[in-house]
Amino acid sequence: MTIERDGLGAAARGLRQYLLAVAAELDAPAWFCEVDAPATAYIALEQRLARFPDHETALLWDERDGWAAAVESATGEDVVVLAYLGEDVLPAPDAVVAFVRGLYGDGYPGQPAPPDFRRPGAPDGFDARLAAYAGDDVCLPEGQA
């Protein structure tokens, strides 16, 4: 099954619904996503990290590495990744929330290196996983829920 990512297709709607669920759980003030391959997302976090009190904190997501915690650089033009969740490219929203809560504790949860879960555009059932978040009746390949 091929699921087009034209901004209106099931995968695109699913990505937006997935991100909306994560952002709502975090009570995030703003978020946006790009649905074309490679899909990416940014969620602004309200709270700053104690180690970086002068820098905005955010969550980044992409379809290759999944979730990462980041802070704005000193210039505010770039972001610096602090840690990757590393669990799955599409972990449950509550796993993302736990990752964020861990950021504000002692040290950073997750892993320092990008997990490199998948190649964008690979025929691996990823778009079907996204489509499932849209609530569409999509059959996932066996072993992919």
Image: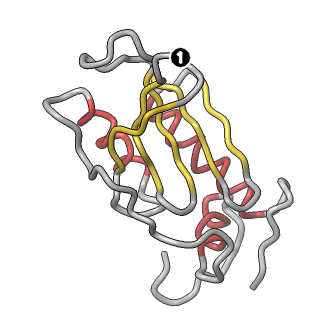
Please state the horizontal and vertical placement of residue 32, each as a whole percent of the image.
Answer: 67, 36
How many numbered markers are drawn?
A: 1
Answer with the quarter of the image where residue 86 lies: bottom left
Please state the horizontal and vertical placement of residue 71, each as a whole percent of the image.
Answer: 43, 27
Left or right: residue 129 versus residue 12 is: left
Q: Judge whether 132 appears above or below 144 on screen.
A: above
| Outermost top residue | 54
Q: 92 and 74: which one is in front? A: 74
Q: Judge whether 48 appears above or below 37 on screen.
A: above
Please state the horizontal and vertical placement of residue 83, each as a whole percent of the image.
Answer: 33, 44
Left or right: residue 109 versus residue 123 is: left
The N terminus sits in image quarter: bottom right
Q: Residue at x 58, y 50 (%)?
A: 18
Q: Residue at x 67, y 61 (%)?
A: 135
The residue wearing badge 1 is 75
Q: Amino acid at mark 1?
A: Thr
* Crowd class of label 1 (few under 14; some 14 to 19; many from 20; radius 10 Å): few
Q: How is the image coloured?
A: secondary structure
For numbered disc 1, what is the local secondary structure? loop
Answer with the quarter of the image where residue 5 lies: bottom right
Q: Residue at x 59, y 23 (%)?
A: 77
Q: 145 and 83: which one is in front? A: 83
| Outermost bottom residue | 142
Q: 94 and 58: which one is in front? A: 58
| Outermost front residue | 75
